[in-house]
Amino acid sequence: MAERATHRDRLRALEFEAFVAGAGGRLLHTATLLTGEPSHPPGAYARAERLLHAALARTYADWDGPHGGDPYDLARRELALRFAREGRRHQRPRGGPLDRLTPVERLVLVLRVYEEVGEEQTAALLGLPGDRVRAVCARAVAALRAPRRDAGPGRASSHGRAGQRAARGPGAAP
Amino acid sequence: MSAGRRDPREEQVRRMLDGPHPALPPDLAAWAVLRGGRRLRRRRAVRRTAGLLLALALSALLVWAGVEQPWESEPAQVTPPLQGW
């Protein structure tokens, strides 16, 4: 009985290691986007590594649990929920491509745009209404497309080229 | 989901985000297996203990019911009044 259990555990560990070897790079990239850290050089994304580490441990524990389904979805879900829980700690800009955004904007943008999770699924995962997800996503996209301004408190100021560009209606893009 | 209704601005942002993947730390999976395995074993132990306690409680109930037989009506404790002597 115990022997069979350890055999099953070993199989599960092998499966899991194959999964991490395949999907780990993408998951770590997602984690660096969330934490707002640059994805190189190695060592510049310690927080992302820690986040992914915890999410993967949970993924392993839930590997053939009641959730079942796609392990990538499971890992991404863990990553997102964990980040949502500790979002406040990731507020300071750290030099990554998304460090201008707030943690919630980053989370919604990464899920919706980079990971291409559906709007309803994102809303259900984060416990937010669907229109709020849409609004946050649109705001984040607008903020990212605006030219970077390093000094200055408000990225949402409504004058200058940034404001004009962000204020353009949908469908008016070139 | 549906690729047809994709906003070109979102597409541009997606390309911006889609850089090269960072290098994975070599012991990531092993660490996750270690930590996750600990969690898994703890969860199993909790489940086993809960099952054991439940079985214990159930058998105690059965033994008590067998001995006590609470569905039997109690013998009358009150003696009938003595009359005619």
Image (cartoon, coloured by chain):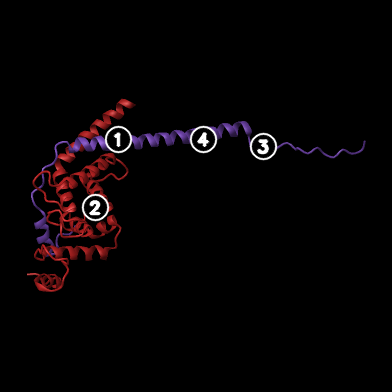
Chain colours: A red, B purple
Q: Tag 1: residue type?
A: Arg
Mark 1, residue position: B38
Marks 1/2 same chain? no
Residue sitting at x 21%, y 42%: A53
Q: Residue A92 shows which numbered tag?
A: none
Marks 4/2 same chain? no
Q: Tag 2: residue type?
A: Arg
Residue A44 position, x and y percent, is 12, 47
Cβ–Cβ below 8 Å for labels 4 and 3?
no
Label 4 crowd bin: few (<14), some (14–19), many (20+), radius 10 Å: few
Q: What SS does tag 1 mark? A: helix
Q: Quadrant of the C terminus of chain A?
A: bottom left
The label nearer to you, 1 versus 2, is 2
Marks 1/4 same chain? yes
Residue B82 position, x and y percent, is 87, 38
Considering only vertical position in the picture, is B57 above or below B21? above
The label nearer to you, 3 versus 2, is 2
Mark 3, residue position: B72
Cβ–Cβ below 8 Å for labels 1 and 2?
no
Q: Chain of mark 4?
A: B
Q: CA distance from mark 3 to mark 2?
A: 66 Å
Q: Chain of mark 3?
A: B
Mark 2, residue position: A89
Mark closer to the chain start, 4 or 3: 4
Q: CA distance from mark 1 to mark 4?
A: 30 Å
Q: Is residue B8 visible?
A: no
Q: What SS does tag 4 mark? A: helix
Q: Chain of mark 2?
A: A
Q: CA distance from mark 1 to mark 2?
A: 26 Å
